[in-house]
């Protein structure tokens, strides 16, 4: 065996871990969207109240957004859990997460005492909430979405089954 043969036949096993991280990111973000969307979809007036409490959108637009948003979350969640159109679902889901972060940080900066309504509920509350955990949670979810934008190929996805 020559020196050149030894280097070309180096058979170190390579494991591609990115699709596994993508699977975890897909399921974390997808299940979160499914759960939060399903909870909000069962009580649209409460979702509208939560949206209005941020005092960012005009009243009628906040009501429209509050009625639409739970169903967008459910659609993004389903697409992510199934791994179908993963990159597009991650782009739209990440943009939605950025909007949520802007809303929470804005409410925090303006001294509003509200329940964000992320998992139902919402509206003004008497006790000033600690928004730190809401922000950290949403940043973590945004990281999951960003990962999927850049690395959409994941294990056990319909994208992989349909398009290779």
Image (cartoon, rainbow, N blue to C red):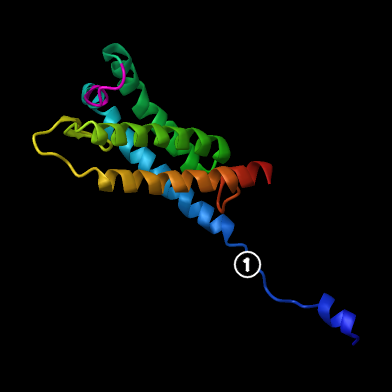
The quarter of the picture where residue 130 lies is top left
Report the residue that reaches farthest toward the bottom. 1
The quarter of the picture where residue 121 lies is top left
The residue identified by callout 1 is: 15
Q: Where is residue 64 in the image (x, y as percent from the top left)?
A: 33, 16
Residue 131 vertical placement versus 6 (above, below) = above
Q: Which residue is drawn at 28% across and 31% down?
A: 40
Q: Position of residue 90 (x, y in %)?
A: 51, 39
The quarter of the picture where residue 149 lies is top right
In the rendered structure, the answer to whether residue 110 lies left or right of residue 6 reads: left
Q: Nearer the viewer, residue 113 or 162?
A: 113
Q: Residue at x 21, y 23 (%)?
A: 49
The magenta stretch spans which residues?
Answer: 51-57
Q: Where is residue 105 in the image (x, y as percent from the top left)?
A: 30, 36
Q: Residue at x 48, y 43 (%)?
A: 145
At mark 1, the secondary structure is: loop
Q: Residue at x 51, y 44 (%)?
A: 146
Image quadrant containing the N terminus: bottom right
Q: Is residue 99 magenta?
A: no
Q: Which of 118 and 54 is in front in this view?
A: 54
Q: Position of residue 89 (x, y in %)?
A: 51, 36
Report the residue that reaches farthest toward the right. 2
């Amino acid at each position: 065996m020559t020196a050149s043969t030894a280097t070309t036949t180096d058979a170190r096993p390579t494991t591609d871990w990115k699709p596994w991280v993508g699977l975890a990111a897909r399921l974390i973000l997808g299940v979160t969207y499914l759960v939060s969307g399903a909870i909000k979809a069962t009580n649209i007036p409460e979702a509208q109240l939560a949206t209005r409490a941020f005092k960012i959108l005009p009243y009628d637009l906040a009501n429209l957004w509050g009625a639409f948003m739970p169903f967008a979350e459910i659609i993004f969640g389903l697409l992510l859990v199934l791994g179908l159109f993963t990159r597009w679902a991650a782009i739209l889901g990440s943009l939605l997460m950025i909007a949520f972060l802007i809303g929470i940080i804005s409410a925090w900066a303006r001294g509003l005492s509200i329940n964000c309504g992320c998992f139902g509920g919402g509206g003004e509350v008497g006790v000033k909430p600690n928004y730190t955990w809401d922000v950290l949670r949403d940043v973590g979810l945004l990281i999951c979405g960003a990962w999927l934008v850049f690395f959409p190929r994941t294990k056990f996805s319909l994208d992989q089954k349909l398009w290779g």
